[in-house]
Image (tube, helix red, strand yellow):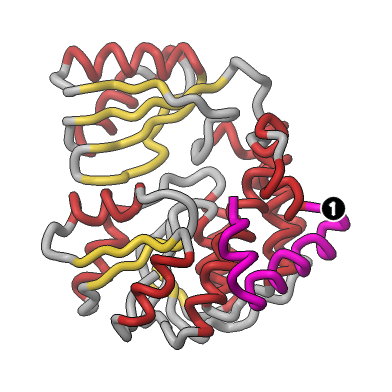
Amino acid sequence: MGREVFDAFQCARDVFHQADQALDFPLSKLCFEGPEEDLRLTHNTQPAILTVSIALLRSLQEKGVRPDYVAGHSLGEYTALVCAGSMTLEQAVKVVRNRGLYMQEAVPVGKGAMAAILGLEAGVVIEICKANCESGMVAPANFNSPEQTVIAGEAEAVRRASVTAKQRGAKRVIPLAVSAPFHCELMAPARDRLARDLHNLNLKDLQTPLVSNVDAVEVREGRSALDSLVRQVCAPVRWVEIVRYLVTAGVGRFVEIGPGKVLCGLVRKIEPACQTFNVENTREIEALASAKSNATM
């Protein structure tokens, strides 16, 4: 993961070297060589995705591509804040490594679960979660598209809510292979530990406005960005509202930076008229740069 951009751009190599030094750990070797089972550990996955994303971002910036707004889905909000100049790469890679560790340790293995519910409106999913709270904690974790909402919570409550969703007409209910139930109140211990780390950082005011996960509104002050990162741990990701806010603000072109194309697909489901581009390799960097496009990332 990330080897191609590392080989192609000096600025990308600098990013990987800075991440290795900040963590005092050869993250770049883990990204390039594995082993895969170590890379899949949350406390390694999160800084690895962040580092690859920033390497791609710096390569795009070197080509003159700049965003008008930034946004990120969960972990991606850290990449967005680095892009906006509020947080340094070194700060971000350290805090997200701890974030992954705190999240993993917050809930014993097997106690929590997550599931994606497809084909039901968000309001119906909220009702379903409330109706199954007697079985344990369960709540929406990601509002991904008008017909895709992810739920998280205690395993039995998530299972019962999934059954109810099928009964209410969901097209599909997909249990997610995750290491912990993210973006719900079970993550409160992780939130509290992460808050201490974040409050030791000096986040600068943003050079580019961020539309935050927790409130789906513009954030321009460093202290507001920090508060959003803390609350984000237990709060649902409001991706539908974020995309619609950006479109209302005049954005018609979105760039997804980093491994995968999931967000591009979600944007098209939310606002089909928008253009989407994903950048995860050198070919896509060159293609976007040649288009001379300023785009939301």
Question: Which region is colored magenta?
Answer: 1-26
Q: Secondary structure at mark 1?
A: loop
What residue lies at 76% left-to-right and 56% top-to-bottom? 196
Q: At which x and y percent is residue 100?
A: 67, 43
| Figure check: 262 above or below 296 | above
Residue 290 in sight? yes
In the rendered view, does 59 fall on the left or right side of 105? left
Q: Is residue 7 magenta?
A: yes
Main structural element of the magenta stretch: helix, strand or loop? Answer: helix
Residue furthest out toward the right: 24
Instruction: Please tell me which residue is depicted at 34% across the width and 22% down the height of the picture.
Output: 174
Q: Position of residue 66 (x, y in %)?
A: 42, 83
Residue 160 in the image, given as x and y percentages of width and height: 36, 12
> Who is closer to the viewer here, 202 or 28?
28
Q: Which residue is mark 1?
A: 25
**Residue 103 appears in the picture as rendered:** no
- In the picture, residue 274 is in which quadrant? bottom left
Horizontal and vertical percent position of residue 184: 50, 36
Report the residue at 30% width, 20% height from top: 131
Of the residues shown, which amino acid type is indicated by label 1?
Answer: Phe
Work out whether 254 lies above or below 29. below
Q: Quarter of the image containing the C terminus?
A: bottom left
Residue 19: say if magenta. yes
Locate residue 122 relative to residue 102 in the image: left or right. left
